[in-house]
Structures are given as structure tokens and as C-alpha cells.
Image: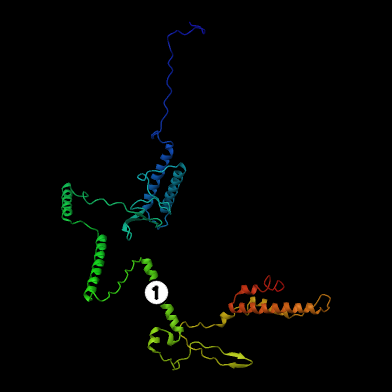
């Protein structure tokens, strides 16, 4: 038996068992990516947002069902989280991987489900693609990509070769396919040149000795907005001339009347019916003055002044301020000991009372004409005449 102090035999080594291998991740990323978990999270968020967008498209967006509302809310929140992560980690996914999101409602835009596309021409510019969100209705216009050539699309190789040969033969003959816009532009240039040549020939036929009239300068082409402004300016000029003719004398209203001396006779016949407006009867010192008809004038008819609109303060709680103020001004001024004041103090009091009376008349007239209770409160407490009147 070997003791504890016995030495091991030389030339023999002890082999230790290998530790168990750790379980690796189910996905692998290249070593060039510094933060692979960020890319993985962004891809996952985009896929989940697209899934919820497809799920929400099966419901009606206008309906208030719980399923459609929750799906739309979830996809917008997920898209917003993906944008935040992309901005903070300074990572932008490839456009072929991710989908476009609406800038207003953060909904994932999937063609045919949550977005509609329409290619159209934008005036003199090139074709554009109009993308409309199906959730909120936001519209985005982007330049349309180049169209796919017609040769080789849905046709056999022989058909494509035949069309290519026909195109080369037409180009050799001098025939080329021109767009409708180019044809219209060429036609307008030709008509302009032919008109100039025709006008020149007509001038030569009249006689070389006669002095040819100066050709009118060509008017520049105006845009649609410039034409609208020109029309509005003309209409305003016409209206101003009509207003001037209405108020000017008939002999100086227009150039034709000044040149020809033709004046329209003034209407001497009285009106058939009673006048539309009449002044109400006014009672002065017991004698009533009869209402006189106002002269009939062209233009806008003046509105009648009704009594219940002129005075809405009288008889209301707001009228108490005027009553208290008038009674306060009529009261005699006395000192505390009952003695009379001097001439200077009485003059100052009379001046203050006169100013207060004028202010009372002003505010009362303004309040009764407008029926505004704010003017009434300006007279009394904390108003222009002090806090003495409440």
C-alpha cells in the first residue's frame, strides 16, 4: 500500500474532463456589426408593426370596434419605438427591408391595404406618385420612377426582336415617336412663325412706300395665378368706376357723355308707393312734428333703428348706476363741522362736478346707444368717476 507521502511515477499525466459546451444563440450575426442586438430589435419591431398593419386592414378604419382601434394603436406605438431606437443607436435599416410609415399617424403604409397609390402628371413637371394613407388620409407626393421599357414585358423574344427592327427602320426613315406634349409645343411654334410670315407678306402687298405699322409686342405667358389676379384687378376697377358714376354728376360720369353731350333727364315723377324709410315723429314742447319721407337714393338701403335695440339698459339692474350717480352729483357738499367753505374750494368743487356731469352724460349715452353693460360698470365702482358710486 502506498502511503500519503508517496510520489507519483514520472512520465504519466492526469487528463481532466472537458467542461460542457454552453448553448449558443439561435441566430448569428457577422463580426463587423458592433451592436447586433440593435439590428435584431429593429427588424423585429418592423415585422411586428407590419403584421399589426395587415391585421388592422381587415377591419373598417371608420368603425369604432375595439379590434381595429387596438391594432392601429399597437402598430403606431411599435413604429414610434422603432424610430426612437434607430435615432438613438444611429442605425438606419435598408429601404428594401423596412416599410414606409405615415408621418402623421405613424401607421405602416402597405400598398393596397393601408395605402393607395396613384401615378399622375403634375402640370408641366414630370409624373409623380401620389400616396394616400388609408388611416388618417395624409397625402405624400413623390417623383415617379422611370417606367419599365415596353420591349420584353409580357412578350416573347421574337416579338421583341421584331419591334426592335421596326423601330430601327422607322428611325432610319426619319420617323420617331414624339410625345403629345412635344407635338403641341412644336405646333404652337410653327403657328407663331407662320403668323409672322403672313403678316410680313400682307405688309409688302400693301406697298413698300407706305410705312408699316409697328408690330404689337408679344404678350408674355402668364400663369394661372397671375391670370386670376389680373381678372380680380379688372373687376375691382369696374366696380370703382361704377361707384364713381353713381355719385358723380350725370354730365361728368363717363367720357361718352362728355363728348356727345347726351344727358339723361332726371326723374320728375313722384314715387308710386310710400317711401320705404321714414323718420319717426318727434315731440318737442308738446307739439309733434310729422314724419318726413327720406329722399330715395340708389345703393344700399339703410337699416331701420329699432327701439329695443337702442336702449337695452333702461329698466334693468344696470340702470341703477346712472340713477345713483345723478343723485350723488345733485347732493349739496357740506363739511364735517357744518361750516361753509371758501370761494376757491367751492370753485374747485363746481369744476369737479361739471367734469363728473359731462362724464356721466358721455357714459350714459354710450351705454344706452350700445346696450353694453360693461360701459355702465366703468362709471361706478373702480370706474372713471371713482369708487364712491356703487
Between residues 250 and 120, which one lies in front from this camera angle?
A: 250
Q: Quadrant of the C terminus?
A: bottom right
Q: Taking the image as drawn, is residue 284 in sight?
A: yes
- Measuring 41% from the left and 76% from the top, which residue is drawn there? 237
Please name the residue shown 37% across and 43% down the image. Answer: 94
Q: Is residue 53 left or right of residue 5?
A: left
- The residue that mark 1 highlights is 234
Left or right of 369? Residue 82 is: left
Q: Residues within 10 Å of mark 1 (few under 14, many from 20)?
A: few
Residue 350 vs residue 275: left or right? right
Specify whether 85 is left or right of 372.
Answer: left
Q: Residue furthest top?
A: 1
Residue depicted at x 70% and y 78%: 355
Can residue 313 be seen in the rendering of this structure? no
* Relative vertical location of residue 298 with respect to residue 4 in this rendering, above or below: below
Total residue callouts: 1
Q: Which residue is rendered at x = 57% and y = 81% of the image? A: 308
For the view shown, which residue lies furthest in the front direction?
A: 209
Q: Position of residue 53 (x, y in %)?
A: 38, 50
Residue 50, image x and y in percent? 38, 47
Q: Nearer the viewer, residue 94 or 350?
A: 350
Between 198 and 18, the one lying in front of the other is 198
Q: Position of residue 301 (x, y in %)?
A: 48, 83
- Secondary structure beneath dot 1 equals helix
Q: Height in image: 14 above or below 375?
A: above
Amino acid at each position: 500500500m502506498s502511503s500519503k507521502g508517496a510520489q507519483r511515477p514520472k512520465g504519466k499525466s492526469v487528463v481532466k474532463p472537458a467542461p460542457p459546451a454552453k448553448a449558443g444563440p439561435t441566430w448569428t450575426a457577422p463580426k463587423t456589426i458592433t451592436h447586433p442586438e440593435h439590428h435584431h430589435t429593429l427588424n423585429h419591431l418592423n415585422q411586428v408593426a407590419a403584421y399589426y398593419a395587415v391585421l388592422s386592414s381587415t377591419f373598417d378604419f371608420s368603425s369604432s370596434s375595439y379590434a381595429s382601434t387596438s391594432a392601429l394603436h399597437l402598430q403606431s406605438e411599435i413604429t414610434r419605438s422603432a424610430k426612437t431606437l434607430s435615432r438613438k443607436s444611429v442605425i438606419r435599416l435598408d429601404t428594401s427591408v423596412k416599410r414606409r410609415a405615415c408621418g402623421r399617424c405613424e401607421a405602416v403604409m402597405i400598398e393596397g391595404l393601408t395605402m393607395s397609390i396613384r401615378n399622375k402628371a403634375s402640370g408641366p413637371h414630370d409624373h409623380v406618385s401620389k400616396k394616400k394613407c388609408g388611416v388618417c388620409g395624409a397625402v405624400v407626393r413623390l417623383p415617379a420612377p422611370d417606367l419599365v421599357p415596353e420591349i420584353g414585358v409580357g412578350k416573347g423574344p421574337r416579338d421583341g426582336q421584331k419591334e426592335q427592327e421596326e423601330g430601327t427602320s422607322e428611325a432610319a426613315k426619319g420617323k420617331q415617336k414624339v410625345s403629345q406634349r412635344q407635338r403641341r409645343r412644336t405646333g404652337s411654334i410653327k403657328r407663331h412663325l407662320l403668323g409672322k410670315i403672313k403678316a410680313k407678306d400682307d405688309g409688302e402687298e400693301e406697298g413698300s412706300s407706305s410705312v408699316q405699322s409697328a408690330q404689337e409686342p408679344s404678350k408674355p405667358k402668364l400663369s394661372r395665378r397671375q391670370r386670376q389676379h389680373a381678372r380680380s384687378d379688372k373687376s375691382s376697377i369696374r366696380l370703382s368706376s361704377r361707384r364713381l358714376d353713381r355719385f358723380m354728376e350725370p354730365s361728368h360720369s363717363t367720357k361718352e357723355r362728355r363728348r356727345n353731350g347726351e344727358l339723361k333727364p332726371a326723374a320728375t315723377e313722384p314715387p308710386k308707393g310710400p317711401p320705404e324709410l321714414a323718420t319717426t315723429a318727434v315731440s318737442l314742447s308738446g307739439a309733434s312734428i310729422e314724419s318726413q319721407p327720406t329722399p330715395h337714393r340708389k345703393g344700399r338701403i339703410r337699416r331701420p333703428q329699432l327701439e329695443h335695440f337702442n336702449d337695452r339698459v333702461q329698466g334693468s339692474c344696470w340702470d341703477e348706476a346712472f340713477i345713483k350717480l345723478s343723485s350723488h352729483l345733485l347732493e349739496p357738499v357740506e363739511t364735517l363741522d357744518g361750516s361753509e367753505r371758501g370761494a376757491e374750494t367751492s370753485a374747485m368743487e363746481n369744476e369737479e362736478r361739471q367734469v363728473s356731469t359731462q362724464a356721466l352724460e358721455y357714459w350714459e349715452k354710450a351705454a344706452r346707444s350700445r346696450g353694453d353693460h360693461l360701459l355702465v360698470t366703468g362709471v361706478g365702482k373702480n370706474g372713471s368717476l371713482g369708487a364712491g358710486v356703487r
